[in-house]
Amino acid sequence: MSGIASLPLFHTIAGKQVLVLGDGPAAEPKRRLVERAGGVIVEDFARAVDEGVRIAFIAFEDPLACEAAAINARCAGMLVNVVDRPELCDFTMPSILDRDPLLIAIGTGGASAGLAKHVRLRLERVLPGTLGALARALETARPVLRRRLPESTARRRAVDAALREGGPLDPLDPQAFQRVAAWAEGAGGALKGQVQEVVLTSADPEELTLRQARWLGEADVLWLDGEVPPAILARARADAERRMFHVKQGGKEGSGGGLAGVKPGPSAGKAGSGAGHGEPGDGLTVILRWRPGETEV
């Protein structure tokens, strides 16, 4: 599986103490950020240790002071962020696009705060200010959806269909939040399962079509035919169930296998060809066939 440089986390600090050390233009933005997230600022190291503070921001102008403070805070069990010193950090701060309660964090692992900022500024112009209202409306509609669609897979598929581009709740539509209540009331009814097939001839995920990338991101089950590259699998839903084809006796590995509950169709067509398989369960099943030696015709 392809790696990522750091693990993005959203940490709730409302009402919790956070150590902020330093002064001047580097420290003040950290204080404002902690206060904005509801944290309680502590500026005395000894007090922070005594009271079990777990997060520290360090922003001294003196590099040696930063290094010493980082060592001391880490030895006290704190997670440390040192402004402009990624090599001293346990975590780095992303550029934040705020559509409360929806937050988008853009980080470069400390490589370039300027790059993260300008990506955020571009997204600010694209994403409507009503995204937060859409998130709150979906939260309010959750009990209605649970009543009408008791199965979690059916609910997820209904939400996916509504939120995708051009759907009734398209996130880029500024008016989408106004339609959530009516959509939730009419979201009942059985959702027919789907099976989609993708023949992969390249390990480069950038060669996936938009439709194929969407299938991977929404798939409930992945059937793997062959050694599908990790970079491709990294584009799939992290919690999607993954299964390997059964190998027929005397058959070649990764080919000719059968799927439990899914009837194998005719020979695979071009990458991204639709289903040719029947009887899937609820939700979306994606069959990934690794065929690096083949070329499209």
Image (cartoon, rainbow, N blue to C red):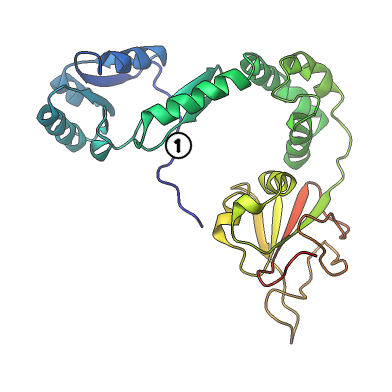
Hey, which quadrant is residue 66 in on the image?
A: top left
Task: Give 173 or 184, whichever is nearer the viewer.
Answer: 173
Residue 181 vs residue 131: left or right?
A: right
Task: Locate residue 12 relative to residue 281 in the image: left or right.
Answer: left
Q: Residue at x 76, y 73 (%)?
A: 257
**Quadrant in the picture for the C terminus:** bottom right
Of 183 and 27, the residue lying toward us: 27
Q: Give the tally of numbered discs.
A: 1
Residue 41 spot, x, y in % from top left: 28, 14
Can you give x and y, in whole percent of width and height, for residue 84 in the image?
26, 29
**Above or below 176: residue 76:** below
**Kind of residue at badge 1:** Pro
Outermost residue on the bottom side: it is 250
> Residue 187, percent across and down?
84, 28
Label 1 neighbourhood size at 10 Å, few (<14), some (14-19), many (20+)?
some
- Report which quarter residue 108 is drawn in: top left
- Is 227 positioned to the left or the right of 194 in the image? left
Q: Nearer the viewer, residue 198 or 243?
A: 198
SS at circle 1? loop
- Identify the residue shown where x is 26% and y is 27%: 83
Q: Does any portion of residue 92 appear in the rendered image?
A: yes
* Location of residue 283 in the rendering, given as x and y in whole percent from the top left corner: 78, 46
Query: To which residue does mark 1 refer?
Result: 8
Relative vertical location of residue 59 with respect to residue 224 in this rendering, above or below: above
Task: Name the residue located 74 percent from the left edge and 30 percent from the top edge.
Answer: 163
Depicted 39 relative to depicted 88: above or below:
above
Q: Is residue 136 above or below residue 76?
A: above
Q: Residue furthest front?
A: 297
Residue drawn 88% across the image and 57% down it: 279
- From this viewpoint, is residue 102 visible? no
